[in-house]
Amino acid sequence: MNDEQATIDTPPNHRLFDQENAVLNPVLRKRMNKQQQQQQQQEAGASAAPIINFSFGKEFADLFRGPAAANNTNAEPPVYTPPVPAQNANPPTPVYTNAAPNAYDLACPTLLQPNRKPGIDMSLEAFCKEYELDDGIRDRFQEHRYKHARIFRFLTINDMEKMMFMAGEIAEVRDAIDRWSVAA
């Protein structure tokens, strides 16, 4: 190479690139800073401690698992089996849930079955008209201050019997609520 050519490592022979010039241009200042950084890294690299990597196999991890895992590497982990409760002479009261979403449980004490959600809310008058319940049923509900269909989800068969509903009227109301409600 010709000594008169400027390269990345050799700046041009000009007064603006004179390193002893007190006012350096930004390019030369950046080059000098870079050279200083490289020199510091080389000095630090020579005195830095060596990096050592270790690779541990499966056997090393078995030390922390205990002797059973180390001896039997193909064994599956133990499966937790919950204790079986003792059988009572009196079985618990059944929970009123049905496997089939449209099954009707006659033993359910509430008018709204557990596998159903309330339908759209409407006034008691609109409900009775929509589901063809007679005026006697509507009047008995109004007498006991029922005003909206959404309240039927709290009503039980026992409550209806206390209100003096007849068995046929209870069946009609249950049918109406079953048609009004939606599957859960």
Image (spheres, helix red, strand yellow):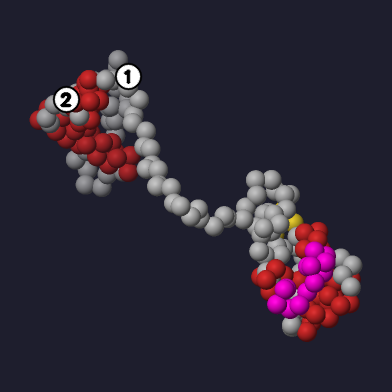
User: What residue is drawn where x is 74% and y is 78%?
Assistant: 163
- Residue 158, horizontal then vertical, whole percent: 67, 71
Numbered marks: total: 2
Looking at the image, residue 164 lies above or below residue 3: below
The answer to whether residue 139 shows anywhere in this view is yes
Q: Report the disc number at residue 74.
A: 1
Query: Relative to 173, is 16 above or below?
Result: above
Q: Is residue 88 left or right of residue 6?
A: right
Of the pair 180 and 82, the residue shown nearer to us? 82
Name which residue type carries label 2. Answer: Ile
Lateral position of residue 122 relative to residue 38, left or right: right
- The location of residue 109, given as percent across then percent down, is 66, 64
Q: Is residue 164 magenta?
A: yes
Question: CA gap, disc 1 to disc 2?
Answer: 33 Å
| Left or right: 13, with 102 as reference point | left
Front residue of this view, candidates 56 and 84: 84
Identify whether 32 is placed above or below 10.
Answer: below
Residue where numbered disc 2 is placed: 52
What residue is at 43 percent from the left and 47 percent from the top?
87
Q: Residues within 10 Å of mark 1 (few under 14, many from 20)?
A: few
Residue extent of the magenta highlight: 160-173
Which amino acid type is shown beneath numbered disc 1? Asn
Residue found at the very far front of the displayed protein: 89
Q: Nearer the viewer, mark 1 or mark 2?
A: 1
Which corner quadrant holds the N terminus? top left
In primary-sequence order, the first of circles 1 and 2 is 2
Q: Secondary structure at mark 2?
A: loop
